[in-house]
Amino acid sequence: MPAFIQMGSEKHFSSLHTTLCATGGGAYKFEQDFRTVSDLQLHKMDELDCLIKGVLYIDSVGFNGHSECYYFNNPTDPEKCQKLPFNLENPYPLLLVNIGSGVSILAVYSKDNYKRVTGTSLGGGTFFGLCCLLTGCSTFEEALEMASRGDSTKVDKLVRDIYGGDYERFGLPGWTVASSFGNMMSREKREAASKEDLARAALITITNNIGSIARMCALNENINRVVFVGNFLRINTISMKFLAYALDYWSKGQLKALFLEHE
């Protein structure tokens, strides 16, 4: 950002007589720098207002003649998994889950009527930060590439690790994660886990948590369509398919996870 502000000064952006729109925390944090260094006035927009209007706008425009919005059918079966269009013509009410560094969850009842239901500090920044610590990676793309080659079951403790199978009384399948990173209490299992396994476990941990919170919010607000957006989902098909499956499975088909081509 300092480099951009300096460029604005050197290239005399202020002489262009144009409006510079800005949103997010940086619109406030760097506003004085824009004024003093580049002689620029910011037209500040609320980021959540922009988010909702942006979602509705790009959906109305479409994507290469197709729907902007889509969902996954059979998300965990590589052979049967299909990416199918979803019509958002009558979108309300919808739950909008914005996954950036952290997560904000909005219940949207109309273009101008929405509320922030809740959020979590465990988001895309958490995944990337943990991967930097655990694997030594330096980019988000590298972290995701490592996660795509890992096996999180070597890191996480599953229900079957505790019960030897399913926990039938409460309907918990054996593959359910009972404790994220739970196997790392064992030195032997720590030594057996690769960096790729750790990256995968970090991704599943964060994705699981977001899906769980989104599901509870949807039930509480009585909304059955959940739209996931945000930079965390860029080139991140693993998380999208996992969210799609988790919402469908735990809601017994009552909740649908929706995504946008431009996340």
Image (cartoon, rainbow, N blue to C red):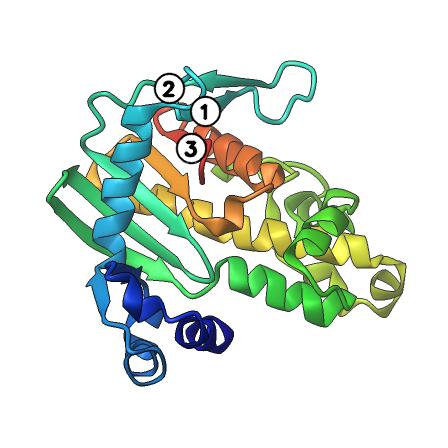
Compared with 64, 167 (above or below) is: below
Upstream in sequence: badge 3 or badge 2 = 2
Q: Which label is found at residue 106?
A: none
Q: Could you tell me how far apart the alpha carbons at marks 2 and 1 are, in whole angstroms?
A: 7 Å
Check disc 1 and report its element: helix, strand or loop. strand
Disc 1 target residue = 71
Taking the image as shown, residue 59 lies to the left or right of residue 99, namely left
Residue 68 seen in render: yes
Amino acid type, mark 3:
Leu
For the image, the number of numbered tags is 3
Q: Position of residue 48 (x, y in %)?
A: 25, 54
Compared with 57, 86 (above or below) is: above
Taking the image as shown, residue 194 lies to the left or right of residue 62, namely right
Q: Position of residue 83 (x, y in %)?
A: 53, 20
Disc 3 target residue = 260
Compared with 92, 178 (above or below) is: below
Q: Mark 2 touching mark 1, by CB under 8 A? A: yes
Q: Nearer the viewer, mark 3 or mark 1?
A: 3
Q: Estimate how packed mark 2 is, as few (under 14), some (14 to 19) or many (20 or more) residues with alpha carbons within 10 Å.
A: some
Disc 2 target residue = 86
User: Residue placed at 51% from the left, 37% from the top?
Assistant: 169
| Quadrant location of the C terminus in the rendered image | top left
Q: Position of residue 2 (x, y in %)?
A: 47, 78
Of 255 and 83, nearer the camera is 83
Q: Could you tell me how far apart the alpha carbons at marks 3 and 2 are, in whole angstroms?
A: 10 Å
Upstream in sequence: badge 2 or badge 1 = 1
Check disc 2 and report its element: helix, strand or loop. loop
* Extreme residue in the bottom direction: 36
Amino acid type, mark 1:
Tyr
User: Residue placed at 23% from the left, 71% from the top?
Assistant: 41
